[in-house]
Amino acid sequence: MIQNSVTRAVVIGTGHYLPERVVPNSAFADTLDTSDEWIVSRSGIERRHFAAKDERTSDLAAQAARAALDNAGVGADTLDAIIVATSTPDYTFPSVATMVQAGIGADKAYAFDVQAVCAGFIYALANANALIVSGQARRVMVIGAETFSRIMDWTDRSTCVLFGDGAGALILDAQPGTGAPGDRGILSTDLNADGRHRDLLYVDGGVSSTGTAGYLRMQGNQVFRHAVEKLAQTAETALEKAGLGARDVDWIVPHQANIRIIQGTAKKLGLPMEQVIVTVQDHGNTSAASIPLALSVGVESGKLKQGDVVVTEAIGGGLAWGAVVLRW
Ligand code: UT7
């Protein structure tokens, strides 16, 4: 009999933060040829939060981190590592993660950022899991935090109505497992990238190219085409790696970019929308923050419970995509 043969990265707390300012779809119709009807029917988005002028990604991230520490009932000084997934850092460097570390007083934690755009949180979770199962950390804070409002071209109706700001965090703890799919914690990860598609979704500026922050550019319908297929595929691969099937899944917690992508992916996986946590109507697309935001909202609303099998999946610029299967 195999017992306590592996270390699992188990979620012990979640938290999130959304900036105070809520912007409804109707706000865009004043300056752009768009409508609430178009935005809702094409994306499912009804409103989004935008950060205040003096509010930075590290502020959002630190607020989410504090909420996760409260939820877990543990102190910042117990963290071994902090990983922040973001494509909209305060500065080129230092990392947002080191600012969070100082902000919350996580004196013993090493800290770094991960950049895989909308798939950033999946990449960060997989890296945190690797640190824990390899014994390089016992307790890791994983944060997704973005201020995409800062890279919007407000004259481009095809992008600026889609994105929002926010942050979500979770804390992973090393706990003994048996190695079987019945364990709590991260059961499998699946990461992918295909850099040939970089022109489909990118920012047209940067440190070593233009010297500016740049604006987000997207061929939305092309990204859409890749999304459903690749998301269903990576979710299925991750489930297979975990030794589970779609019938074992309690919740899909997808990246929240578009309700039609979320519905299409659930359908391909053969799961009803009742088993999907959806926040896109309230948050818009918050890139790397969308999954931890949805996880935290899922816990708060009483949907996500200990023992539930959760599949998270995301795709974004790169293209980069992936999935993580975990038992809550
Ligand atoms: O999170 C990272 C990954 N990103 C995504 O997953 C986003 C994936 N893509 C999408 O979510 C969708 O493609 C969009 C919501 C961006 C667009 O929906 P679509 O059904 O693919 O529309 P489309 O891009 O094919 O555009 C249809 C029409 C176009 O007009 P014409 O050329 O047919 O005359 C657009 O110009 O809709 C027009 N349009 C708009 N109309 C009113 C584009 N944006 C707007 C707008 N308001 N805001």
Image (cartoon, grey):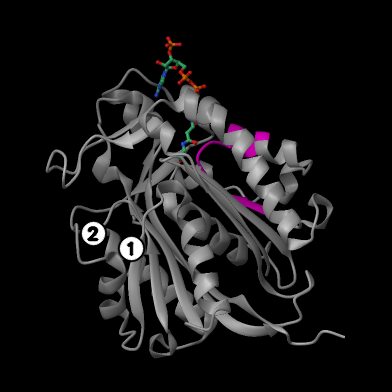
Position above or below: 4 against 112: below
Instruction: State the residue lying farthest toward the left.
Output: 211
Residue 55, numbered label: 2
Q: Amino acid at mark 1?
A: Leu
- Callout 1 crowding tier (Cα within 10 Å): few <14, some 14–19, many ≥20: many
* Helix, strand or loop at mark 2: loop
Q: Quadrant of the C terminus?
A: bottom right
| Residue 104 in which image quadrant | bottom left
Residue 253 included in the magenta stretch of the image: yes
Marks 2/1 in contact by CB < 8 Å: the verdict is: yes
On the question of residue 238 being in view, the answer is yes
Callout 2: few (<14), some (14-19), or many (20+) C-alpha neighbours within 10 Å? few
Q: How many numbered dots are placed on residues in this image?
A: 2
Residue 144 percent coordinates (x, y): 42, 60
Residue nearer the viewer, 302 or 62? 62
In the picture, measured across the screen, residue 123 lies left or right of residue 327, that is: left
Task: Name the residue located 26 percent from the left edge and 24 percent from the top edge.
Answer: 31
- Say which amino acid is labelled 2: Glu
Question: Mark 2 CB in 8 Å range of ligand 1?
Answer: no
Residue at image point 61% right, 66% down: 299
* 259 left or right, relative to 158: right
Where's residue 82, x and y in %? 39, 74
Q: Is residue 227 above or below residue 132?
A: above
Viewport quadrant of the N terminus? bottom right
Stretch of the chain drawn in magenta: 252-264
Residue 89 bears which disc, if any?
none
Q: Earlier in the sequence, mark 2 or mark 1?
A: 2
From the viewer's perspective, is residue 161 above or below residue 248?
above
Q: Residue furthest right?
A: 1
Q: Is mark 1 within 8 Å of ligand 1?
A: no
Which percent across, then down, holds residue 236?
71, 48
Q: Which residue is mark 1?
A: 60
